[in-house]
Amino acid sequence: MGPYFTRERFGRPQFLAALILLAFLAQALWLVHVELSSAQPMDGEEALRIGEGLKQWRGQGIASAPLSDPVDDPFIHLSQSSENGFDTEHSPLLSLVSAAPLLVWPSHLNAESATYWRWLPKLPFLACGLFLGASLWYVARRLCGNTGGFIALTLYAFSPSLIQAAAVWHTEPEIVAAWGAFGTIFTAIAVAHTLYAPREVVLWNWRRIVLLGISLAIAVGSQFSLLVVAPMALGFLLYVAPVRRQAGLVIWIAAGVVGFVLLFGLYFFRWQAFAESMRHAAFWGATWRGFTILGVYKQVAVRIGRACPALAVALPVAVVTYAAWPRARYFGNTAPLLVSGLFLLLGMAHPHVAGAGFLLAAIPFLFIFVSGVVADLLETSYRPFVMACTVGMMAAYVVWSLINLAQVPQG
C-alpha cells in the first residue's frame, strides 16, 4: 500500500482540486434544496423515469421497453422520443439509476415524506457530476500541467449548465451522457499511448479495455445517438498508435464486446425486450436542416454562453491563438477541439432530445482546449499579462456564477 499513497497522487494539487469539486457539489446540492423546498410536484419526465425504473427493479418489465401504459400514461406527451411505447433515445440506464436509491426507502413513496425521499433519485447524478469533474481534472493535468488542470476544473466547477445537469434541476440528466462520452474518448487515447510499450498489449490492457467498454456502455446507454463515440474512439486508437494498428483494432473490438454485454445487461439480459428496443432506437436521427437556419447557430452560441460565460472571452482567444501560433497546434489541444467541434455540429443536427446531450458533452472538451492554450501562453514571455487576465476572468466568472446561484430562489 505504501508506494500507492505517494505525494504525486495525494499531494497539494489533489487537495485543492478536491476543494474545487466540493464547491461544485455544494452548488448542485443548493439547487436540489431549492427545488425540493418549494413543495412543487415532481417534474413529469423525472416521475416517468422513476416509475419505469422501479417497474424494472421489481421485475414487472423493462423500463420504457415499452412503457407500462403507453396510451393512458399522463406523461407520455412529455416524451417526444417515444415510438409505440419504446424510448427511441435512451436505454433503461437513466431509469434504473434514478430508481435504484429508492429501493432502500423503508416506506411508501407518499407526498408527506417527499421532501426526504426525493433527494435519493438525485444522488447518482450528483455523483456523475463529481466523477466527470475528477476525470476532467485528471486529463487536463496530464495534458497541461497543474495550471491547466486548475483552469479546466474551475471552469467546470462553476458552470451553470453542468451544475444544473448534475442536480437534474428542470432538465434532462445529460450529465451521464457527457461523462460517458468524455471517458470513452480519453480512455481510447490513453489505451493508444500504452501500445508503444514492449508487452503483450491486448492482455496487458485488460483493465483499460474494460474501462473503455464501461464508458461506451454509459455513453450509448444514456443516449443512443452517442454511438458515434465508438468510431471516434477507433480513429484515435489508430491515429495515436499507427505502428500497432492491428492491436488497437483488437482492443477496440474487445471493448465493444464489453460495452455490448453491459448494454444488454441494462435490459436484464432479456433478449426480446433488448431486440425490440434496438429496433426502435434512433442511433442517428440527424437532420441537416438545422444548418440552414440562422437561429440554430444563435441558439448554440447561447447554450455555450450559458454553460460557461467565461467561454465568451476565453474561447475566441483560444481559437485565434491556436490558428495563429504553431506551438499551440499539437495533439493535446487539437483532439479536444475536434471532438467538441463535432459534438457541436451533431447538437445542431439533432433538434430534439439528443441535441442537448451533444451540446453539453462538448463543454468539457472545450474546457480542456481552452486550458491547454492558456497553459501554453503562460509559458511565454507574456506570462504576467496572461496570468493577470486569466485570474481576473476566472474571479469574475466565479463571482458571477455564485451571485446568480444565490438568486435562484427569487428567480
Image (cartoon, grey):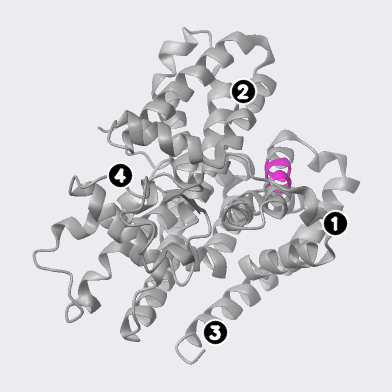
- As for residue 339 lying within the magenta part, the answer is yes
Q: Position of residue 251 (x, y in %)?
A: 51, 17
Q: Is residue 32 visible?
A: yes
Residue placed farthest to the left in the image? 106
Tell which tag, 2 or 1, sits nearer the viewer.
Answer: 1
Residue 159 in sight here? no
Q: Check the image and report above or below for 127 versus 138.
A: below
Distance of label 2 from label 1 (alpha carbons): 34 Å
Q: Mark 4 points at which residue?
A: 62
Residue 237 shows which numbered tag? 2
In this rendering, which labeled residue sits more in front, label 4 or label 2? 4
Q: Mark 3 belongs to which amino acid? A: Ile
Give the residue type that dot 4 points to: Ile
What's the mark number on residue 403? 3
Crowd tier of the residue under label 4, counting other residues whose Cα lies within 10 Å: few below 14, some 14–19, many 20 or above: many
- Mark 3 or mark 1: which comes first in sequence? 1
Name the residue tied to disc 1: 292
The percent coordinates of residue 278 (x first, y second) are 47, 35
Q: Label 4's element?
A: loop
